Amino acid sequence: MSTPVTTPAAPGPGGSAPSGPTVEPEEAERVSAGRRVVDRLIRARELGLIVVLIAIVAITGAIEPNFLDADSLKQTVLNVAIIAVMTAGMTLVIVTRNIDLSVGSILGLSAFLCGDFLTKNPSVPWIVGVLIAILIGAACGLLNGVLVTWGRVPALVVTLGTMYALRGVAFLVTGGRQINAEDLPDSFLKVGSGDLLGVPTLIVLAVVVIVLFWFITRDYAWGRQLYAIGSSGRSGGQAAKLAGLKSDRRVTQAFVISGALAGLGGAMYAARYGTVDATGGQGYELRVIGAAVVGGVAIAGGSGTVFGAALGAVVLGTIQTALIVLKIDDFWQQAIVGLLIIVAISLDRLITNQSEALLRQRSARRRTAA
Amino acid sequence: MSTISPTAPAPDRTPAAPRTEDSIVKTILGRWETLIVGLIVVVFIIGAGISSEFLTGDSLTTGSSDFTEYAILALPLTLIIATGEIDLSVASVLALSSALMGYLWNQGLPMEAILPICILAGALCGLINGWLVTGLGLPSLAVTIGTMALFRGLAYVILGDESVTDFPTNYTDWAFGNFAGTVIPNTIVLFLVLAAIFAVVLHRTPFGRAIFAIGANKEAARFSGLRVNRIQLRLFILSGAIAALAGILLTLRNSTAAGNVGDGFELTAIAAVVLGGVSIFGGTGTIGGVILALILLGAIQKALNLDPDINTAWVNIVTGILLVGSVLGPNIAARVREARRISTRGTRPPRPGRSAAPQSGPGGEGNTNA
């Protein structure tokens, strides 16, 4: 923060704990009971997604056995890889109670610039192109983050603006050109279609990114701080700030990572599809946010895991392929993504309401017993 | 400007209580609307420089006619944003209405039946949004991101990738024609009538006061006896119905119904509302300011389109920048003033009228995050 924050009182040691510094024993018991219920819910969400996933695969496979081919399943997972990588970044941003609508445009811009660079410099190793894509994405993310934290502009407004502005920039940069697969170096295209130890490279990459950020957000202070910032969101992150967290810096970093992963997604997009023009990644922001929300990341911030979000991406991607295999009209896809978002957030709310009522009942019963 | 004092940021959009002659002048100069009018003048001067066609009746006709749908979408959006909520699904409802219109026309229904059905369908979409927000208590951002995909998807489901173009000429002629021999298009006259109704409702009725009260402080509004949920539900229904009307107008004006129309219209509509001085946190704003912002955006779009050398991608870039800038600008101004006040505080005793520092408390930057 560059502005002085007048601290009214010394913050309690557990600034982000819901019950404050003075925890009565009974109260503490209630909190731990609440934590247990929440834990169970999170696990239920991930288990639920796995069940849904198995059901989709089984039903589709029963109707159309081709769906269960190794090749078809590989295609499904390949399609998911790019979205899953971007979803990991989006999860970090949403957990801090922000949103990033610009990832699709960042993907388009970085995919084109990465492809353009590799086309013009075929002798340079492809990894340089990937790094350029990541850097461009990170720069866009930095812009978003600075506008949100330093400029105090709501993330919705910032990223809605940059979503269109960056798409406009992509159109300016391409000037109507298109990069084709034959222009790109073979070594780069091989990343998109090749294998690493028998597993498609893109999938390896996606798994590495997801596992990395899952651990960072689960076990490291940096990641837990994001949750603290997001769950003190009603006061604009004040509780986290009073507890001494560098809230603005963390939020900016989350945006930078989201942008960088969208840039990486751009490089993956260029490597996988080979053809890139200014419209690359259009509408991806909806699929990425949809995957995160279906995966249990709450738009209101403070809850959800990178692993859950990745599962959400896999479920959405599998449904998409299943629709194609079942020869259901392509046009249903977007409607189903939207419907799943609505169903997921509604279910979350209903479960939360119920578990809150349960907790209230339990603590009331305990109070009367005491 | 509203007389309700805002609790949200963007302080320099509300004139401070005038104390002297000097400060009255300052108040007028410092008003948000004055700034927009100044920008409009600048754009008109630049536009006239770009092309001699800019300041002609013909250009006014086409320019304003092309902006009809944004303008109409912005009206109910003003009300929704003034209550502190958001509706990202307006452009998708517009597309759904257009697709439904084409489908029903293909089915051989008369236009007299189709138009009310489309409006009702739009209202139903709004009801879904509104119920999810008020009934289930979900954040409007998450809900309308979901329905944005859902309604757009349904538009594709209804009409696929075909388009319907054989609408009756008496309807399309009206939508394409000018009002009573003037240079003003019929559709803009319809917009002006709607705008007048919205302005009266927002600024001269208890319903309008209730909207600002909800935006300023939802809890306080509820405790003072306002039916917050019912009012918000009505606003979402209104937004859906008006978006459907905009879809009908767009379909008739282009005499084309398709599922992909109006892609990205929500950006321009939201940009107009925010640029027009409506706080994205709710509680302040005027219809007049939004109309001025619409004129500004429309003039920019027309001016950029008139010059064949300027890439049309600039429209997106400029709109995005204006959207972010309209929130960023006042925030920076507030920061500068704040810094100046702090630096002078040491040498001078604080002025008697300003005992409470509005921006230095921890709540001052309340809603940094979306």
Image: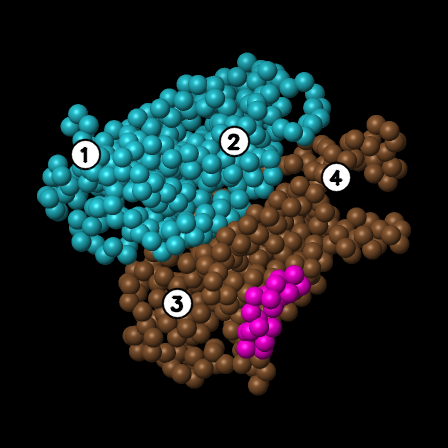
Image marks 1 and 3: residues in contact by CB distance under 8 Å: no
Q: Is mark 1 on a helix, strand or loop?
A: loop
Letter of the cyan chain: A
Q: Which of B290 and A189 is in front in this view?
A: A189
Q: Which residue is drawn at 49% across and 46% down?
A: A162
> Is residue A29 part of the magenta span, yes or no?
no
Are marks 2 and 3 in one subunit?
no
Expressed as whole percent of the image width and height from the top left, the position of residue B276 reads 63, 56
Which of the labelled discs sits on residue A194, or is there none? 1
Mark 3: give few (<14), some (14-19) or many (20+) Cα within 10 Å.
many
Image mark 3: chain: B
Residue at the spot of label 3: B98
> In x, y percent, where is residue B60?
57, 73
> Quadrant location of the C terminus of chain B?
top right
Q: Do the residues labelled 3 and 4 touch (CB within 8 Å)?
A: no
Q: What stretch is highlighted in magenta?
A: B41-59
Residue at which label 2 appears:
A251
- Badge 4: few (under 14), some or many (20 or more) residues near its Cα, within 10 Å? few
Task: Confirm whether circles 3 and 4 share one chain.
Answer: yes
Who is closer to the viewer here, B136 or A7? A7
